[in-house]
Image (cartoon, rainbow, N blue to C red):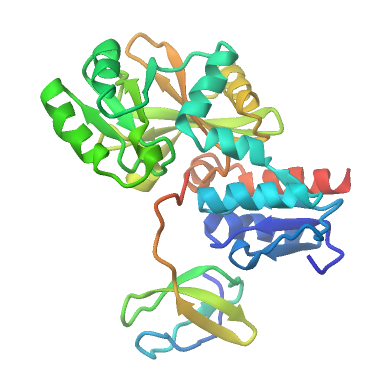
Amino acid sequence: MTTDARLAVLASRVRFEEKQIMAALDRRGVSFVHLDPRSLVVTDEAHFNEKVVLNREIGHYRALYAASALESAGAAVLNTAAATHVSGDKWLTTSALMAKGLPTPRTALAMTPEAAFDALDQIGYPAVVKPLVGSWGRLVTAIPDRATAVGILEHVAALPSPQQHIIYVQELVEKADRDIRVLVVGGEALGATYRRGDEWRTNVARGALSIRCELTNVHAKLAVAAAEAVGAEIAGVDLLEDDDGRLTVLEVNDRVEFRGFQEAHEIDVADVIASYAMARAEA
Amino acid sequence: MQKVVNAPECPECAAQVSLESDARVSEIVECLDCRSELEIASVAPPSLTVAPEVEEDWGE
């Protein structure tokens, strides 16, 4: 950063969310720089002391390593590299939630595709197999029975990365065609939306709609605790409500996409995030 | 709708692509002629490049 600005927005792609955050910073008269990680090089001589970097990078690995490198050069990154590391990995998230005693769907981790059959037997069919690092619901696969598992796991075994051979198996929660997204900034829940879709994966990126949902104390408390469990100051926490009304934490998103939430709520989420980052930069 | 301030050339089909006055570097726009997804490389002067393909780890 060759500027006196104390705040930077890290993003290789300026989507609705990044554009709104930058506009909010402009409206507030805050000096900031847009840092594109595609051209970022951090050496052992780099100094980012007293800089606050709002991490809005779309790619998980670039977000993670850029955050780590910037922290090593003295920057404070929102969210921290550690939070991105945990929330970007489904098993690490599950592990962090379990360590805090938070409810999460029953999950098993198998170290090979072959061992995944045992994991599936223990979780029970139907179950869900998810990539450890993945987004927008890609490659998340519902497995109704052992015959389907044989084919799916053969495909998984043929994938090139060793990490893809570690199999994350989770119970398929019987639920309505929706989940609940709670936005958390600085330990406070801003609100909640139902995300309702035509298929069982209720990602907005897969066409699910965001519909305003009343934020209860239970939602808020659970979402704030989940964000804290992974160390995220800014987070989108996904909750599932089963047919009996039991809530579980499905995942925590550290670089949250909030367009659907903002449109459903008329809450200026971008301004809340900008204000939070600004306060950190001024602290 | 923001006022259109400039219209750089699409790197794919050479059509003029209108940018809004609040356009930002790294924002994605679409060429209405060839439907290519384009990235704003610069706003002053305005220029466009072909947007990168979506990668496996993109998104939340």
Q: Residue drawn 54% across and 62% down?
A: A13
Residue A81 as seen in the image, left or right of residue A249: right
For residue B26, say whether it is visible: yes
Q: Residue at x 34, y 35 (%)?
A: A165
Q: Is residue A95 above or below residue A264?
A: above
In percent of width and height, residue A216 lies at 55, 18
> The N terminus of chain A is located in which quarter?
bottom right
Can residue A55 be seen in the rendering of this structure? Answer: no
| Residue situated in front as seen by the camera: A3 or A18 | A3
Image quarter in which the C terminus of chain A is found: top right
- Residue nearer the viewer, A131 or A112: A112
* Residue at the image point whose x is 61% and y is 71% from the top: B22
- The quarter of the displayed image where residue B15 is located: bottom left
As drawn, A2 above or below A137: below
Q: Is residue A180 above or below residue A16?
A: above
Q: Is residue A54 left or right of residue B40?
A: right
Give coordinates of residue A66: x percent, y percent. 64, 53
Number of numbered labels in the structure image = 0
Q: Position of residue A201 (x, y in %)?
A: 31, 35
Residue B25's quadrant in the figure? Answer: bottom right
Name the one closer to the observer, A5 or B8.
Answer: A5
Percent coordinates x, y for residue A57 in the rendering = 57, 54
Quarter occupied by residue A200: top left
The residue located at (62%, 87%) in the rendering is B45
- Of all residues, the one furthest to the left in this rendering is A147
